[in-house]
Amino acid sequence: MEDEIRAILNDSGVLGDAAWNIGSDVELRSLGVDSMQVVQILLEIERRLGIEVPDEKLVPETFRTIESIAAVVECVY
């Protein structure tokens, strides 16, 4: 699932090619990812995977790292 999240971060332009070179536990905020980009990531995850992330998972902790995003998506997927 982390590779799918990396592909979304790459394809959406949020991180571009850098998405493939960062550790799974690197905080996305430290890379300049802002709240508008988090919404973009969320929408792209839901579109590509055909899922809906539950409201209770729409918290900053979910979108902290690639690892944390993948963990939530795996639970929903």
Image: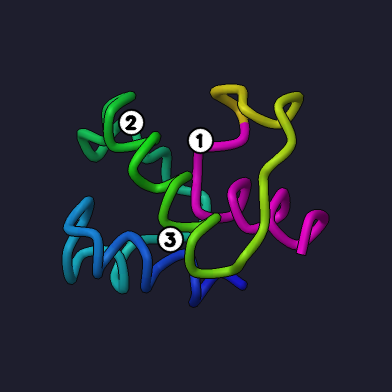
* Among numbered discs 1 and 2, the one appearing first in the sequence: 2
Task: Find the distance from the CA under tag 1 to the CA under tag 2.
Answer: 7 Å
Badge 3 crowding class, 10 Å Cα cut-off, few under 14, some 14 to 19, many 20 or more, is few
Badge 1 crowding class, 10 Å Cα cut-off, few under 14, some 14 to 19, many 20 or more, is some
For residue 29, the mark is 2
* Among numbered discs 1 and 3, the one appearing first in the sequence: 3
The quarter of the displayed image where residue 29 is located:
top left
Q: Nearer the viewer, residue 73 or 19?
A: 73
Q: Are marks 1 and 3 in contact (CB under 8 Å)?
A: no
Amino acid type at mark 1:
Arg
Amino acid type at mark 2:
Arg
Q: Are marks 1 and 2 in contact (CB under 8 Å)?
A: yes
Q: Is 17 positioned to the left or the right of 55 in the image? A: left
Amino acid type at mark 3:
Gly
SS at circle 1: loop
For residue 23, the mark is 3
For residue 64, the mark is 1
Q: Are marks 3 and 2 in contact (CB under 8 Å)?
A: no
Task: Find the distance from the CA under tag 3 to the CA under tag 2.
Answer: 13 Å
Residue 47 is situated, as x and y percent measured from the top left of the image, at: 49, 61
User: Residue at coordinates 62% horizontally, 46% vertically from top-left?
Assistant: 68
Q: Nearer the viewer, residue 59 or 27?
A: 59
Residue stretch rendered in magenta on the structure: 62-77
For residue 73, the mark is none
